[in-house]
Amino acid sequence: MGQRTVRSRKTLIERESELAAVDEALSELTGLRADGAEAAERPRGALLAFAGRAGIGKTTLLAEVRRRAAAQGCTVLSARGGDQEQRVAFHVARQLLQPRLAGVPEPELRSSLGSWYDIVGPALGLCAPVGGAPPDQEGLRDGLDWVLTHLALRRAPMVLVLDDAHWGDPESLRWLAAFASRAEELPLLIVVAYRPDELPDHAESLRGLPGRAGGRPLDLEPLSAAAVARLVREALGTHADDAFCHECWAVTAGNPFETVELIAKVRDRALTPNEDGAHLLRDLAAAVKGSGLSARLERLGPSTVRFAWACAVLGTEILPSLAAAVAGLGHEAAADAVDALRGARVLTGSETLEFVHPLIATAVYRAIPPGFRVALHGQAAWCVVDTGHGAAAAARHLLETHPEGDPWAVQQLRAAAGETLRAGAPDAARRYLARALREPPPAEERAAVLYELGSASLLTEPATTVNHLRAALEEPIADAALRHHIVYRLSQVLAHSDRLGEASDTLARETRTTGDARVRLRMVAEQFMWDAFRADEPDHPSRSRRLTRLADRLKGRDLTERYVIGLRTWDAILRGEPAPVALHHAERALAGGLGWAEPDRGFEVPVLVALAFMYADRPGRTEELFAAGIADFERQGWRGAHLSFGYTLLAYLRYRRGRLAEAEDFVRSGLRLAQRVGPGTPAHWYAVGILIEVLLARGRVAEAAQTADHYRFGEPFPAAVVFPDAQTVHGELLLARGLTEDAAAELAAAGRRLEPRGIRNPAWCPWQLHLARAESHDSPERALNTALDAVSRARQFGAPSAIGQALRTAAEVSSGSARIKYLEESVTHLERSPAAYELACALVALGTELRRSGRTKEAAEYLYRGLDTAVLCGADGLVSQARDELAVAGLRPRRLHSTETDTLTGRERAAAVLAARDRTEAEIAEELHTDGQAVVRLLSAVYRKLGTDRTGLAAALGGG
């Protein structure tokens, strides 16, 4: 597709304010004033939006924008929406980006686009879609963002011009509307023009695009009578009298397009521009559009009319040979028609044709008799396929035809849907498949079409997807593999719609009727998986025993067997079996490969296996698996729910390692992605729950409560199991707020829900630990029993972090010397674990108990260690608690006593503490999981903010 060119230089009258805005924006973009002098400020981008009704001069104005931008050395990207192309996915995006990329050799283009090539290439028509699942729409938009940003930086300054944006396709407009706000951060000027009264629903976002006039689009006004008179006299001569000029203005209402066309008609008719001829103007103006245009076309002959109709059906960038084929004309007749239509100012161009103005194209299209219009679209579909343009080009025409039970039409629509779905446009794919269903398809293909339609609607319209897939199962299906895929997909969408019980029942019914042992095994595996996520599973112990028996005899020969073994791993974690047992099964599941982006598989089991290592105190292994899994997601272009889960659970991992500042950064990134997916989804529950946990650990209770209120984190809790357990997190928040009775009731309810299911591992869900703290206010004895039961369960699991955390809770609800005994053992276990925050809590608690017992010297050691560890973790509330305890003991807290220390980030404070303890830069880098250069930058920032160097850090941090 070539860039659109300016057809002719036209006079711009009464557009001074609009052009001034353009000149100002170009000056800011290029760093040059209109007179060529250098501007005072650095170059920056902007957004200009022009709005106005049809014929008001938007296209002419944008042509002038392109001319001025090119004259100032800007790279110009240009596109135009089309009435006939607005349902063609990425039509606008391709016009903008394809010309800059299509001529680049494939190896060079792959190198330039990197991992984005396979994601954005199909959408932009640069390559065929690869196999596997398509990118999600968030991932595709991120890829398009990257491509445009890359181009804007490499070919700066750049101007992007979009005309007739109201006719843009939904996929392109959603992308551009979201990207537009970034223009000011780039050497990029975006200029958009549209008709505000013709915006379809999918283009409503354009109304929010600001212009330069107080944050709103610049509205183009009709020409004044004086401006119309000037145009008339420039074209017809100065002898045109005032009455004639005024009548020209009156019959056109100052519409620039209609004015120019009327003047051309006057010239063609050799009409004398005076008062005597003024009464003829109204009839001449009527010939510009509507029925008058139709009558004018009819005078050109039937062949020319058919050719014009064919062009109107084809839309923009019309190949004369294709239009001739659609119209059923030979070469000579088509050439004559082109000449006639050019002469009548209906068409312009040579190698490719287009209508002189969209108003003319619309008028010609609407003038086609309805029955003939449908036939022309059908003919166009055949012709575009016959000339090698492919099924996707034919599909938009087939949408306009009547259903006739044509297998060829079904074939083309299905092929187009597959192509657009893999390119990342599920909405377009659904339109094509819904039309294929109405054709209708042959009976033997109906189930396949319903399955494809359901797959295209998978996450965006889950209720509709369920209906399509259930309807597919009711059809006669000869292909057993197709039936199995329908069942897998139906169970998947039911599960993702929080209907886990129905997902499990669907698989159970199909398992009983399936004769293939391998298929039956996969269905059993899928059922086990969805049952594992059911908060209301009726018979968890029975399922656990069946899963154990099955997994123990499998060898992991294929992905299905490894999924079953992976589920056995997770079951062992939930039930609190010894950690070595769980890790044994985890390694078995991983031995043959367990990718996170396997075709037709969920990512749930690989994630559960990775998390098993975290709960068993091997977070490094979890980090490795998460890094590989997130890379799988990004390569696939999955940047919505999938990437949200990845970042959110990575935050949970950092939280459990005590790296709270990093955890907060990751979970907020995950929450931003989850909000793109939608509130109330499992991704959203995960993100909000983990954010609340992190805020509580950092001592920001009020902010955690505000977060819960803002996101409505409370009853009713999700039907799916999420972790951390949502009800337990809510109970922990209530406890932190001092609402002990409410907290005890909430946490006891969590226990009643989890206990019958055999979920007994305090490492996975510490509801007993928080319940014991809540009970200690009114029932100390019951609280101690609850805590000691949790200690027993933690010892059975065997992870030092779980044992240490449970022992700290037992100490908190105990009395006398038992408190110190439990805390000393807690510290011993936690020192062998990666749970730095839990260790800091235990150290501060032990130091506090020793101080209360009069053992000040021993207390100081633990309090200082707890303070240092809390600083490293970013646990600000615990830092304050440790400092207060040191002050009560008469000891000088290690604190940054300068007011400038409040500006230090968590990582800067951590680096400062380690440097003050004489750690080398290499040791600091290892501790903070970064490199030497990053440590140098961190310490440089510390020295600058504190006004000291390394020798003065110890004094700045205090003694002790």
Image (tube, rainbow, N blue to C red):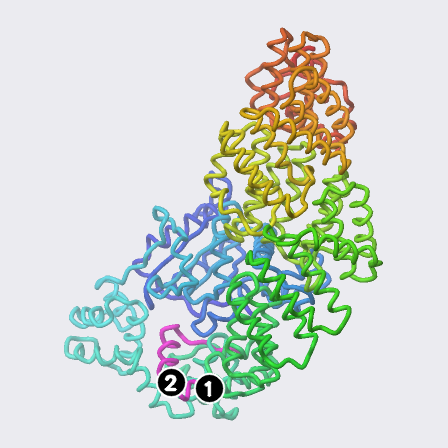
Circles 1, 2 touching at the beta carbon (< 8 Å) = yes
Residue 295 in the image: state x and y as whole percent: 30, 87
Q: Which amino acid does label 2 sit on?
A: Ile
Residue 51 in the image: state x and y as whole percent: 35, 59
For disc 1, the neighbor class at 10 Å (few under 14, some 14 to 19, many from 20) is many
Position of residue 945 relative to residue 533, above or below, is above
Q: For the stretch drawn in magenta, what is the main secondary structure?
A: helix
Residue 619 in the image: state x and y as whole percent: 74, 39
Along the line of sight, the residue nearer the viewer: 323 or 767: 767
Query: Which image quadrant is residue 729 in?
Result: top right
Q: Does the magenta stretch include residue 365?
A: yes
The C terminus: image quadrant: top right
Residue 757 in the image: state x and y as whole percent: 65, 48
State the residue position of label 1.
376
State the residue position of label 2.
368
Asked whether, in this view, residue 959 is left or right of residue 162, the answer is right
Query: Which image quadrant is residue 383 in?
Result: bottom right
Stretch of the chain drawn in magenta: 350-374
The N terminus: image quadrant: bottom right
Asked whether, in this view, residue 602 is left or right of residue 322, the answer is right
Q: Which residue is drawn at 39% across and 92% down?
A: 302
Along the line of sight, the residue nearer the viewer: 903 or 439: 439
The tag earlier along the polypeptide, 1 or 2, is 2
